[in-house]
């Protein structure tokens, strides 16, 4: 068997002839090593792994409603105040965790969000009104 035919494209690309006609491989660098690793790694078709992530619906709602609550009540919208109010709201309202995956019933999540929304908004309004800081004028 001719060994040369076993060489794959990434390796062949790196084999060059010098002036004396001898085949050398002057490029033993990361690209070369990667080529070798690539060639030696058998391609295994992995079955798609199921994906899932956990979220706190309360946290989602706070993120959704804080900007407009601050705007509506003309509160300071700087990063410090937003973080302060977010932390206070997260500490005040018990978390509601759900797992989101491909099989998730998004209508159910939506219904849960709608159920929890008034509590989140009223808490945010209270906290925004309680925040007397105003960092907007500092330049
Ligand atoms: Zn502020």
Image (spheres, rainbow, N blue to C red):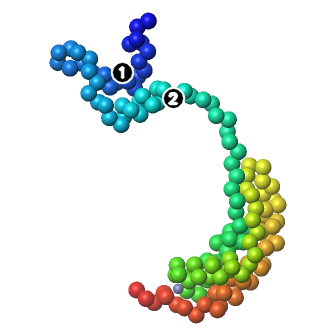
Q: Report whether residue 96 is seen.
A: yes
Image: 9 above or below 77: above
Residue in view at x 48 percent, y 87 percent: 136
Q: Residue furthest top?
A: 1
Between marks 2 and 1, how big is the CA–CA gap?
17 Å
Indicate left or right for 14 with 78 as reference: left
Query: x and y percent of residue 88 in the render?
Result: 65, 82
User: Which sits in the foreground, 26 or 51?
Assistant: 26
Q: What residue sits 65% from the left and 91% below the top?
A: 129
Question: Which residue corresponds to mark 1?
Answer: 12
Relative placement, left or right, of 31 versus 57 is left
Q: What quarter of the picture does the N terminus occupy?
A: top left
**Picture quadrant of residue 46:** top right
Whether pointer 2 and pointer 1 mark residues with C-beta atoms closer than 8 Å, the reply is no
What residue did someone put label 2 on?
41
Label 2 SS = loop
**Dot 1 lies on which element?**
helix
**x then y, percent, for residue 53:** 68, 56
The mark closer to the camera, 2 or 1, is: 2
The residue under the point 76% across, 69% down is: 96
Residue 69 visible within the image = no
């Amino acid at each position: 068997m001719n060994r040369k035919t076993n060489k794959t494209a990434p390796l062949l690309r790196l084999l060059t002839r010098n002036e004396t006609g001898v085949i050398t491989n002057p490029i033993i660098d990361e690209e070369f090593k990667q080529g070798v690793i690539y060639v030696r790694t058998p391609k295994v078709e992995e079955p798609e792994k199921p994906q899932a992530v956990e979220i706190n619906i309360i946290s989602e709602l706070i993120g959704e409603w804080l900007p407009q609550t601050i705007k509506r009540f003309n509160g300071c919208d700087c990063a410090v105040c937003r973080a302060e109010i977010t932390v206070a709201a997260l500490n005040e309202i018990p978390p509601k965790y759900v797992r989101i995956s491909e099989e998730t019933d998004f209508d159910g999540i939506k219904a849960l969000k709608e159920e929890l929304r008034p509590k989140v908004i009223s808490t945010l309004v209270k906290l925004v009104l309680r925040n007397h800081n105003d960092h907007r004028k500092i330049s």
